[in-house]
Amino acid sequence: MTTSTPRAQAWTNWARTTTCTPARIVAPRDEEAVRAAVLAAAGRGETVRAVGAGHSFTPAAATSGVMLSLDHLTGLERLVPLPDGGSLVTVGAGIRLYALNTLLAENGLAMVNLGDIDRQSLAGALSTGTHGTGGRLTGLAALVHGVRVLTADGSVVEADAQRRPALFQAARLGLGAVGVLLAVTLRTTAAYTLTAQEEPWALDAVLDGLTGPGNLVDTNDHFEFYWFPHTRRALTKRNNRGPADTGSRRGPLPGGASGASASRWSRARRWIDDELLSNGLFTVTNEVGVVAPATIPSVNNIASRALSARTYTAPSHEVFVTPRRVRFREMEYAVPRADLPEVLGEVDRWIKSSGERVSFPVEVRFAAPDDVWLSTAYGREPAYIAVHQYIKTPHERYFAGVETILRRAEGRPHWGKLHTLGARELRELYPRFEDFQAVRTELDPAGLFANAYTRRVFGD
Ligand SMILES: Cc1cc2nc3c(=O)[nH]c(=O)nc-3n(C[C@H](O)[C@H](O)[C@H](O)COP(=O)(O)OP(=O)(O)OC[C@H]3O[C@@H](n4cnc5c(N)ncnc54)[C@H](O)[C@@H]3O)c2cc1C
């Protein structure tokens, strides 16, 4: 059975960078109904695009054909314990990450790593190369052990490193261009807590701390920082793992507060900081920036100083994820980790000389190299530089200026975040690009799963 909307209903992504009017939007109830919907679309000569939560900034999911939601394919299929306390977990590919986190926690498990929100679908997050931070940890697609894929001829194929390895590579991170992910088997780990240590630092101290023995990236499980443009200040975040049963520990608190009042103070402080960086107050500072851009450097200065140091411990998925109520546009590139200080210096110089006023902090994250063909971390240690702009502030000039710098550094753009590259440039950046294309050509010769974005980034 399939839930289907009337024709010509407009669809918009979270960031409001893309709008489209699919011929129809369908939400099949089970795998057989997905297959029927895809074959019916092919029979009508329509294209098909799977959609998750619409959280890509790029028009990755946009289509004028059939928009296929897997919101009903979310169940737990199988759980195979591993000797290290983790499990191989097979779930419906449409499951949202927040639901997956709950499901894993109920089974004493957790994701090995996560990005900073949990609204995405699993399939959508995998398909664009979603990642978190951690110099020893990969992005999500490299944690996939196997996939079940519906291909353009209606076949349902199980693929992993042994069975159909090329399809496995292309399907676990491939913008839905080789088929529809129906189910995913993930390598998960035993549940754990994270102790978060967040501290404002001088940017130069952060940059000095990135290299050498004992550097911040390799000695913390998850290290990232937010640099406030127009200042030399950054907010550092170090999240380190502990066993699941340590309970909640609060760090040293001002004024010797203890017990319940300490906990209340800590929660209140955490709320203030989250609001400042991500939400309500941040809306106000951004709105001020819209009407009076000249004030942004001073506002950034105040904001970067208002953030306080804090430490807290909570289940991993609660620490990874921050609610994002302020809408923004984002571009993110992975550059070789060794080049990060130089590249960031260039971005700083460009902002100064361009006269652009940037209210959003620049986010810098890290990951381990992996072997996923279209991963931004394929075969090299990445540092991710993400620039954001408030939804009401034009982002084009800022992003274009920074993109020139990131491209010169041989940066690879996040497939789900704004960028201007096409197949010609991307081919040079990904050693296995042609292997990916071969799978796509073999399995979808007529372009059933194509859209304007896949034609841009992969070619016709
Ligand atoms: C506020 C915010 C925070 C973010 N934080 C991070 C972060 O911390 N780290 C990071 O790396 N990224 C981050 N992103 C980007 C986001 O993770 C990706 O864009 C992700 O792809 C969005 O998932 P989605 O479910 O919304 O997928 P959609 O945007 O709906 O779709 C993305 C792609 O997946 C394909 N797809 C969807 N379902 C299937 C399926 N069943 N089979 C095959 N293909 C499918 C679509 O066709 C499309 O190509 C963030 C985005 C936002 C808006």
Image (cartoon, rainbow, N blue to C red):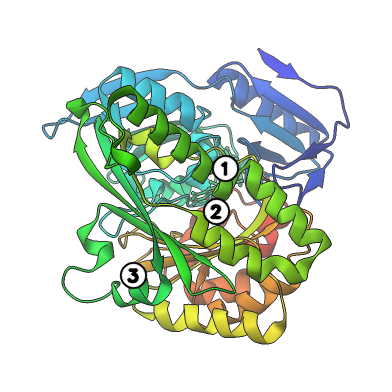
Residue under label 3, please give it. 380
Of the two numbered discs 3 and 2 on the same chain, state the one appearing first in sequence.
Answer: 3
Circle 1 residue: 275
**Residue identifier under label 2:** 440
Q: Quadrant of the C terminus?
A: bottom right
Residue at image point 78% right, 64% down: 394
Circle 1 SS class: helix
Amino acid, disc 2: Arg
**Residue 367: x and y, percent?**
34, 59
Quadrant of the frame with the N terminus? top right
Q: Nearer the viewer, mark 1 or mark 3?
A: 1
Q: Residue furthest top?
A: 1
Residue that sits furthest to the right in the current view:
8
Give the residue type at disc 3.
Answer: Arg
Between 121 and 214, the residue placed more toward the observer is: 214
**Based on the displayed image, in which of its 4 quarters is residue 290 positioned?**
bottom right
Q: Secondary structure at mark 2?
A: helix
Q: Image quarter for residue 338?
A: bottom left
Q: Give, as a three-letter code, the residue at label 1.
A: Glu
CA separation in Å, label 3 and label 2: 24 Å
Q: Nearer the viewer, residue 217 or 106?
A: 217
Q: Which label belongs to residue 108?
A: none
How packed is label 2: few (under 14 Cα within 10 Å), some, or many (20 or more)?
Answer: many
* Residue 448 shown left or right of residue 217 in the figure: right
| Cβ–Cβ under 8 Å for marks 1 and 2 | no
Kindly report the distance in space between the C-alpha atoms of the residues bearing marks 1 and 2: 44 Å
